Amino acid sequence: QQPVQSPQAVILREGEDAVINCSSSKALYSVHWYRQKHGEAPVFLMILLKGGEQKGHDKISASFNEKKQQSSLYLTASQLSYSGTYFCGIPGHSGYALNFGKGTSLLVTP
Amino acid sequence: NAGVTQTPKFQVLKTGQSMTLQCAQDMNHNSMYWYRQDPGMGLRLIYYSASEGTTDKGEVPNGYNVSRLNKREFSLRLESAAPSQTSVYFCASSEQGDTEAFFGQGTRLTVV
């Protein structure tokens, strides 16, 4: 089942902060985050695992709330290079392939 | 490092034609996936292969077939293309299910 992301889009000035949310209707064991720049392939940012372990990017942080079945991605002191579409993904019922949300478009302006 | 390679990068088909999208990875990954991406819809899973020799349907499998030819290669076939299959197709691979996925550069397919 597809996770729900919010907001759909956000525009920031360089240096500002943003939060992107991802929620699921089913229990979460892990959440993946990817970023896709226009015309390019999605690129891995991080994985959050049940229990709090986080693997991935060192300048972007995220939280994982198992009880609320949601994850949030925190982009602090945004840079122009942060622009793109952010997707969260959660493993399907098989535990293998990811089901992605519809994405959050982030534009960072000078 | 090649990573995940998809061919072709662009393709135009006429309705009813068939074609196969090729995908190969050189990272010795066990799992491979096919997604389609349409504006406003995110990435939707078509088929996946958890390991060599196995394939399973994803969210939108109708109109597609797949073959896991060997550990490296996972192809997607459109038997009779329809305009609704106009999309960008991404192949991805990962070591196993719940690990970092690597995506190919995509195939932009237009069915007229």
Image (cartoon, coloured by chain):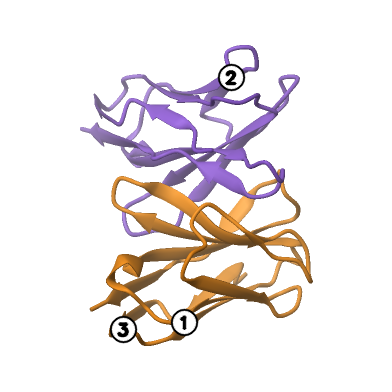
Q: Which chain is purple?
A: A
How far across and how far down the image is residue A9, in percent? 27, 31
Where the C terminus of chain A falls, by quadrant? Answer: top left
What type is the residue that disc 1 sits on?
A: Glu
- Crowd class of label 1 (few under 14; some 14 to 19; many from 20; radius 10 Å): some
Q: Nearer the viewer, residue A27 or B42?
A: A27
What type is the residue that disc 2 sits on?
A: Gln
Chain B: its colour in the image is: orange
Earlier-in-chain disc, 3 versus 1:
3
Look at discs 2 and 1 and give the one toward the viewer.
Answer: 1
**Residue wearing tag 1:** B79
Q: Nearer the viewer, residue B56 or B25?
A: B56
**Residue wearing tag 2:** A69
Q: Chain of mark 3?
A: B
Q: Do callouts 2 and 1 point to residues on the same chain? A: no
Residue at 57 percent across and 13 percent down: it is A68
- Answer whether residue B2 is visible to the viewer in this image: yes
Residue at 36 percent across and 50 percent down: it is A37
Label 3 residue SS: strand
User: Pointer 2 and pointer 3: residues touching (CB < 8 Å)?
Assistant: no
User: Pointer 3 and pointer 1: residues touching (CB < 8 Å)?
Assistant: no
Q: In the rendered image, which quarter is residue B69 located in?
A: bottom right
How far across and how far down the image is residue A32, in percent? 59, 37
- Crowd class of label 3 (few under 14; some 14 to 19; many from 20; radius 10 Å): some
**Residue wearing tag 3:** B13
Label 2 residue SS: loop
For marks 2 and 1, give the CA distance.
39 Å
What type is the residue that disc 3 sits on?
A: Leu
